[in-house]
Amino acid sequence: MIVSFIYPAIILLISIWMHEYAHAFSSYKLGDPTPKMQDRLSPNPIKHLDPIWFFLIFLIWFGRWKPVQINPMYYKKPLRDELITALAWPAMNLTLAIAGMTIMMIYARLMGIDLQTLIMQNFDLVTLFWMMFITINIGLAIFNLIPIFPLDGYRLVKIFWTKWAVWMEQHAMMISVVLLVFLLWPGKGIVWNYIIMVTSKLYDVFFMIGSQIFY
């Protein structure tokens, strides 16, 4: 079905765009003028667009927007503030997931049924989109928290194991290539199983909390 291809691409476009904006906004608020100087302090997606990666998202469901550059030298507490900036993306993804769950529950109420009935019996294209929206955003947050460069989770290492983080930064290209190869083969199954397991648990938590609020 064509929507099973188009929906993930649209969701990834929204999620990754909001990721870059979250980076820019949080870094600027922590004292770094770099995002504003580079005209990246804007929710306008065109400001963050990388044409090649934009089309790759539709072709292979993998891509990115133009990375936001930051300068930790402007931060009052560099390690802490760089971590806050890095974690802005997972926080944004989880916020989007919660927003998606809220919208889906409102939709169920408008349909006059509970969420479980909507998912199990009255499943439609609207429900499919928001279920994918929630799942993808949780998955992106979990994936990005893996403590390996260039993922934002590696910044946790900078706080607890600075020398190892410096080594990763010095060998950024090699690590990036190894990570990409590992994700494609042979570690694809390991990583995906981890993401699916944690995503499923968080999805259930969001569902339980939302059900208590709406029903």
Image (spheres, rainbow, N blue to C red):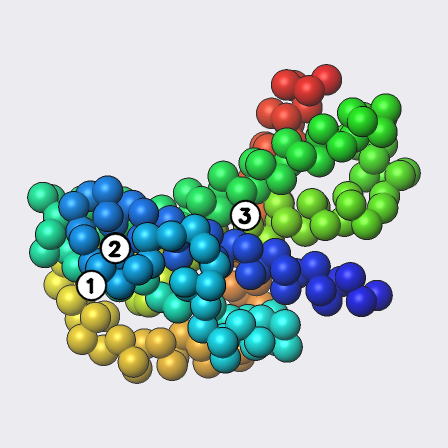
Residue receiving disc 2: 36
Whether 116 is drawn above or below 172: the answer is above
Residue receiving disc 3: 138
Instruction: Give the residue drawn at x 46%, y 63%.
Output: 46
Camera-near label (2 vs 1) is 2
Spatial CA span between label 2 and label 1: 27 Å
Instruction: Give the residue drawn at x 44%, y 45%.
Output: 92
Residue 130 spot, x, y in % from top left: 69, 45
Q: Note whether residue 46 is visible.
A: yes
Compare marks 2 and 1 and give the one earlier in the sequence.
Answer: 2
- Front residue (pair 110, 83): 110
Q: Residues within 10 Å of mark 2 (few under 14, many from 20)?
A: some
Residue receiving disc 1: 165
Instruction: Give the residue drawn at x 20%, y 63%.
Output: 165
Whether 202 is drawn above or below 50: the answer is above
Compare marks 3 and 2 and give the one earlier in the sequence.
Answer: 2
Residues marked 3 and 2 touching at CB (< 8 Å): no
Res 88 label: none
| Quarter that holds the N terminus | bottom right
Residues marked 2 and 1 touching at CB (< 8 Å): no
Amino acid type at image mark 3: Ile
Q: Is residue 140 left or right of residue 154?
A: right
Instruction: Give the residue drawn at x 56%, y 36%.
Output: 98
For label 1, the SS is: helix
Spatial CA span between label 3 and label 2: 29 Å
